[in-house]
Image: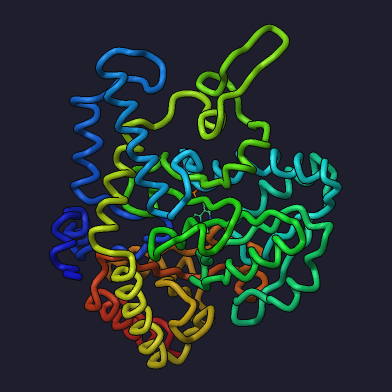
Amino acid sequence: MDVNKIREDFPILSLTLPNGKKLVYLDNAATTQKPVQVVRKVFEVYRESYANIHRSGHYLAQKASHIFEEVREKASKFINASDPNEVIFVWNTTHGINLIAIPLLELSKKKGKKEVLISTMEHHSNMLPWRRAASLLGLDVKYIPVNADGTLNYDSLEQLISKNTAVVALTHASNVTGVVNDVKRVARLAHENEAFIVVDGAQYAPHARVDVKEIDVDFYVFSGHKMLAPEGTGVLYGRKEILRQLNPLITGGGTIKDVTLDDVVYLEPPHRYEAGTPNIAGVAGLGEAIDYLKRVGLDNILNHEKILLGKALKRSAELEKIIVYGPKTIDKRLGIFSFNFKGLNPHIAGQILNEDYGIAVRTGLHCAHPYHYALVANEGTVRASFYLYNTIEEIDYLMDSLVNMERTILKT
Ligand SMILES: Cc1ncc(COP(=O)(O)O)c(C=O)c1O
C-alpha cells in the first residue's frame, strides 16, 4: 500500500491553511475526503447519464437506473450479502436506523417482545431512534454497560438478554474509542433469544472487511461519506426474509405495485423502502468509492491504520498529562485516538491544534454523551481519527505537537 501515491488522488490533503500551516486532516471519523475518481464519477453522471431512475423508459432513464442498480450489486458484494435486494440505499446511517426502528419493533411487539437492548457506547444515531420507537410502541429500553476501558461488558449483556428482547442495537466500532465489538458473539446470543440484531457499521465498514453472512446479523448500516463517497448516500442491509415482513415507515412514490383509494400493495424489497427520488449521482460515487477501497484492499487499510494507532499509543507515554481513552493496545480497536490533557478543556486543545499546528481533529462529546459520561470525560474528548491516506509522519507530527503543547501551555 503506497500512501504517497494514494494521497495524489486527494488534492485537498495538500492544502496550506490561511495561517500558513500545512493541513493535517485527522477528522476522518466525522467524514472522509473524496478521491478524484469519486468526484469525477459524480460529475460524469450529471454530464452524461442523468435522469430520474425506475420511472421513465427513455434512454437516459434506463442508463441512470442501470448505473444505480450496478452499485446495489457492488454494495451487496462489499458486505457479502446473499442478494443485491438486501441492500437499501439510504441517506446515511442515521436515516437507515430510523427507517427500520419502528417497523422492527412493531413486528417484535406482535410476537410478544417487550424490550430493546442498546449499549452505552452507542452514537446517538443508534440510540435515539430506538428510544423513540420503543416509547411510541410501549416497549422498554435497557442499556448494556461498558467497562472502565470503554469495552462492552459482555457478562452484563448475557444477564440482560432474554426471550423478552426484541432487538439488540449495537455498534460494530465505537466512534469515540475505536473499540470493536464482537458482533458475531452478540448475534448468536440475540438469535438464541429470538431477538433481532441491528449493527451500526458507520465506523467499521470504511476500515475493515465486513461479511454479514459470517457475523450473521439481521441488519447492518453504514454511511457513504465516511468511506470516500459523497454525503447523502449509505446502505441499510437487511435480511430479505425480515425485510419482506416489515411495513415501510416512509412511503410514497417508487414504493408500490398498486394504490387504490383504500388499499396499497408495496413492491418487494428493496424498493418498498426507497421512497422518493434518491441521490442518483451520489450513489454512483459510492460505487466508485467501493471500487477504490477494494483496489487498495480493506485488510491493507486496517493494517495501515493499526500501525498509525500503535505509533500514537506508544508515543502517548511521552506525555505526563495525557489521558487516553479505550484499551491501550491495538487489538480490537480501529484507528481512533481520543484523549484529554488533564486540566485542559478539549475544545481549547482542539483549537490550539488547529491554529498553531494545522491539525484538524474533532472535540467534544461526539454524539455519544452517555459513553463519555461512562468514561468520566464529561466535557468530551479530543479525537484524532485516521484513514488510508494518513502517514506515519503525520502521526509523529501530531505527537510532537502534543509534546510541545504540554511543555509550553501545560507547564505548571
Ligand atoms: C458509530 C456512528 N454511528 C452513526 C453515525 C451517524 O452517521 P451519519 O451522520 O452519517 O448518519 C456516526 C457518525 O459519526 C457514527 O460514528
Residue 345 shows in the view? no
In the image, residue 379 above or below residue 52: below
Q: Where is residue 131 in the image (x, y as percent from the top left)?
A: 73, 49
Q: Position of residue 212 (x, y in %)?
A: 50, 57
- Left or right of residue 194: residue 66: left
Q: Position of residue 360 (x, y in %)?
A: 34, 63
In the image, residue 371 above or below residue 401: above
The residue located at (18%, 61%) in the rendering is 7
Question: Residue 31 is drawn in which quadrant?
Answer: bottom left
Residue 79 shows in the view? yes
- Left or right of residue 174: residue 34: left
In the image, residue 35 above or below residue 28: above
Question: Residue 133 is drawn in which quadrant?
Answer: top right
Q: Foreground residue, 233 or 19?
A: 233
Q: Foreground residue, 42 or 191?
A: 191
Image quadrant in which the N terminus is located: bottom left
The residue located at (73%, 56%) in the rendering is 195
The residue located at (39%, 59%) in the rendering is 206
Q: Position of residue 407 (x, y in %)?
A: 36, 88
- Left or right of residue 16: residue 256: right
